[in-house]
Amino acid sequence: MKQAKHKIRLLLADDHPVVRKGISSCLARHTHLQIAGEAADGQEAVAKARELLPDIILMDINMPNLDGVAVAELLHKEVPKTKVIILSMHLNKDHVLRLIQAGVRGYVLKDASPEELVNAIETVNAGETFFSPDVAKIALNQFVANDGKLEPAPLSKLTERERQVLALIAEGLSNKEVASELGIGVRTVETHRERIMRKLNIHNAAGLTRFAIANNLVRLG
């Protein structure tokens, strides 16, 4: 991979300052890479991307306010020229598929070498995609399993709020208790519940509970 002639401007989005510092240190000796800004949560990542228009945003999945999937979906629509590379410890099949559909151009695991990260940045900046081997394997397996279609797994069809509602329902809370817990109206909870059942094709609370446990939305015991 040839070194870029101009500086590649990066935005780092991770809720752990130590991680952002570590990434900055790893990239410091590469003079063609420039840290244009940092963000500590999803909402700040979107705001900084709009303001700074970086070439690439290196972003974790699990962040406060907006998670990486939601941020990727927003940026794909609002700042399409900024390419997104996920840098995460997690290898979640549902996340991988949703992120690809959201237009993410790269996915690197946090245990990757600095050389692999730089390679990912340069590759994505050049207009190509870069996925760590384990991530690419998940995507390919799902692609083959779905007869050539990267269709979302059932859990990935749910919004973040719907997952929250589902988890509380599975814990045995009533609609009124869920509404109180989340600070929303009872009618809103009922609407979410109806949408969850329709999306998952599940028609009773017991089925929702089994689905939530199977997908690690609630803890047994």
Image (tube, rainbow, N blue to C red):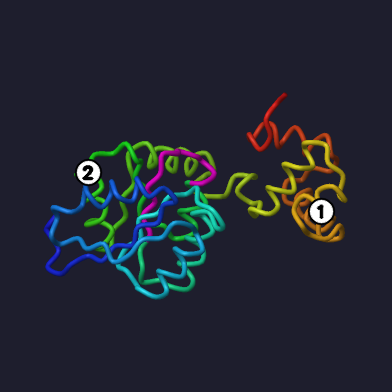
The answer to whether residue 149 shows anywhere in this view is no
Disc 1 packing (10 Å; few <14; some 14–19; many ≥20): some
For the N terminus, the image quarter is bottom left
Residue kind at label 1, given as amino acid type: Ala
Q: Is residue 90 above or below residue 199?
A: above
Q: CA distance from mark 1 to mark 2?
A: 45 Å
Where does residue 75 sit, x and y in percent of width and height? 46, 67
Say above or below: 201 vs 191: above
- Expressed as whole percent of the image width and height from the top left, the position of residue 160 reads 63, 53
Relative depth, front residue between 99 and 55 = 55
| Quadrant position of the C terminus in the picture | top right
- Kindly state the secondary structure of the residue where label 1 is placed: helix
* Front of the two marks 1 and 2: 1
- Tell me if 29 is positioned left or right of 8 in this view: left
Q: Which residue is mark 1?
A: 179
75 is within the stretch colored magenta: no
- Check disc 2 and give the amino acid type: Pro
Q: Which residues are magenta?
A: 84-95
Helix, strand or loop at mark 2: helix
Residue ID at (15%, 69%): 6
Between residue 202 and residue 31, name the one nearer to us.
31
The residue wearing badge 2 is: 114
Residue 39: tell me if it is visible: yes
Q: Residue 172 at x, y = what percent?
A: 83, 37
**Residue at 50% from the left image edge and 51% from the top image edge:** 63
